[in-house]
Image (spheres, rainbow, N blue to C red):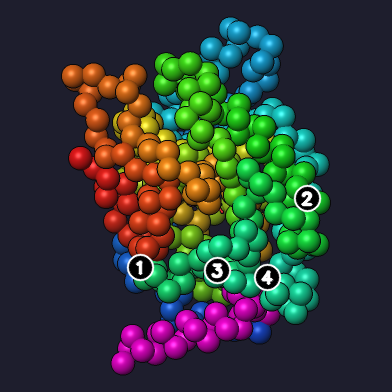
């Protein structure tokens, strides 16, 4: 009976096609039951909610200036990236070549998309996996244990761009512009990661890891009861890596050495976090770290996450721990997989389930 009600409520919410923003616009004071995080004890224990006990702990901020001009500088940067990937699985980059105005315009465009009249926005609302461009609230609404306080526009941008009329007018130009800059930066980061693993710069590119990306534009409305729900449940990303642009609101946290640590917005910076597929390729040398986003009284918070993955392509490439990294002392820890098989396993459970990479553990 309880389950039945929950299912009905989820469906009713989904049918509004207005997302979490629709609830806030309607002036709700208490959040619907299905948003309440069941593991509240776990996720919100005093220690966790206060986030980090040591505010000086920060993920590394790495300056990419002169990456292509100065060999010595490049080696130093590669070393820092390697250290960050082994210790954190997260770092921020500055002087990365994406102009500030392109990032500012992208954030502003996500705001425009979400804040335009509902009738226009609703036309994009969908859960159809075959759609290259779609808007919805909680991609895992029907799979996860608790819904998150967030609406998302998802656009597959590479290798093939959606046709111009598929992209919402409110953010079309900005998405095209941002996507092209991020594609180039992503390419550079694949090279730096390969070098940090002690491989040739083009090793990961030759494995076709950079052949696709999609962009999730997230909108986290202000929440009337932020201690009861999350913006995004604790999870790892199921891709090679993600480049994240966040505004100045904050709320993103990484789980590191048994505590939640804030990833403070740094002006002009982009956050890079490794996904499960790079942890698999590196045979656990590099980490795919768990992270989450808190909900807040203030907002909206806007972020734009670009996922490097080929999950939307008909690729049969098999990915397994890279042979050059293995030895008798370092045997493979994972079974091989296609990107699509891994992602469909990941999505079948919704966010917050048991660490999905364990599924492939040998
Ligand atoms: C994600 C994610 C963080 C954020 O999209 O997987 O972790 O700050 N986003 O929106
Ligand atoms: Ni994530």
Q: Position of residue 121 (x, y in %)?
A: 72, 72
Q: Position of residue 220 (x, y in %)?
A: 60, 63
- Of callouts 1 and 2, which one flags the residue occurring earlier in the amino acid sequence? 1
In the foreground, 145 or 174: 174
- Label number found at residue 40: 1
Q: State how far apart marks 1 and 2 are (Cα).
A: 38 Å
Relative vertical location of residue 279 with respect to residue 346 in this rendering, above or below: above
> In which quadrant of the rendered image does the C terminus lie?
top left
* Magenta highlight on residue 332: no
Task: Say if mark 3 contacts mark 4, CB within 8 Å.
Answer: no
> In which quadrant of the rendered image does the N terminus lie?
bottom left
Q: State how far apart marks 3 and 4 are (Cα).
A: 11 Å
Residue under circle 3?
128
Residue under circle 4?
124
Q: Quadrant of residue 85?
A: top left
Task: Say if mark 2 contacts mark 4, CB within 8 Å.
Answer: no
Q: State how far apart marks 1 and 3 are (Cα).
A: 31 Å
- Of callouts 2 and 4, which one flags the residue occurring earlier in the amino acid sequence? 4
Circle 3 Cα neighbour tier, 10 Å, few/some/many (<14 / 14–19 / ≥20) = few
Q: Is residue 353 left or right of residue 30?
A: left
Residue under circle 2?
174
Number of the front mark, 3 or 4: 3
Secondary-structure class at tag 2: helix
Circle 1 Cα neighbour tier, 10 Å, few/some/many (<14 / 14–19 / ≥20) = few
Q: Quadrant of residue 125?
A: bottom right
């Amino acid at each position: 009976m309880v389950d039945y009600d929950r299912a009905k409520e989820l469906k009713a919410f989904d049918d509004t096609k207005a997302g979490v923003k629709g609830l806030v616009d309607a002036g709700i004071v208490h959040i619907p039951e299905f948003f309440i995080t069941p593991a509240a004890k776990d996720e919100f224990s005093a220690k966790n909610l206060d986030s980090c006990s040591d505010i000086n702990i920060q993920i590394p901020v790495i300056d990419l200036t002169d990456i292509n001009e100065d060999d010595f500088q490049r080696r130093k940067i590669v070393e820092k990236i390697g250290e960050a990937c082994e210790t954190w699985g997260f770092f921020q980059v500055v002087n990365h070549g994406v102009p500030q105005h392109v990032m500012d315009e992208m954030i502003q465009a996500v705001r425009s998309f979400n804040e335009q009249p509902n009738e226009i926005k609703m036309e994009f609302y969908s859960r159809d996996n075959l759609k290259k461009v779609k808007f919805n609230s909680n991609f895992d609404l029907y799979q996860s244990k608790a819904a998150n306080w967030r609406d998302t526009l998802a656009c597959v941008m590479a290798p093939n761009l959606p046709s111009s009329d598929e992209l919402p007018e409110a953010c079309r130009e900005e998405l095209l512009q941002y996507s092209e800059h991020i594609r180039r930066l992503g390419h550079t980061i694949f090279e730096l990661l390969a070098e940090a693993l002690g491989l040739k710069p083009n090793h990961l590119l030759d494995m076709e890891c950079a052949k696709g990306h999609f962009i999730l534009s997230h909108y986290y409305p202000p929440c009337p009861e932020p201690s009861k729900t999350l913006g995004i449940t604790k999870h790892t990303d199921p891709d090679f890596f993600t480049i994240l642009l966040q505004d100045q609101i904050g709320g993103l946290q990484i789980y590191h050495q048994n505590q939640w640590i804030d990833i403070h917005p740094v002006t002009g910076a982009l956050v890079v976090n490794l996904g499960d597929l790079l942890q698999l390729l590196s045979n656990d040398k590099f980490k795919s770290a768990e992270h989450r986003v808190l909900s807040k009284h203030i907002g909206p918070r806007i972020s734009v996450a670009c996922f490097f993955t080929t999950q939307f392509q008909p690729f049969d490439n098999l990915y397994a721990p890279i042979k050059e990294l293995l030895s008798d002392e370092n045997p493979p820890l994972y079974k091989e997989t296609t990107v699509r098989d891994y992602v469909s396993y990941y999505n079948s459970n919704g966010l917050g389930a048991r660490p999905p990479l364990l599924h492939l553990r040998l």
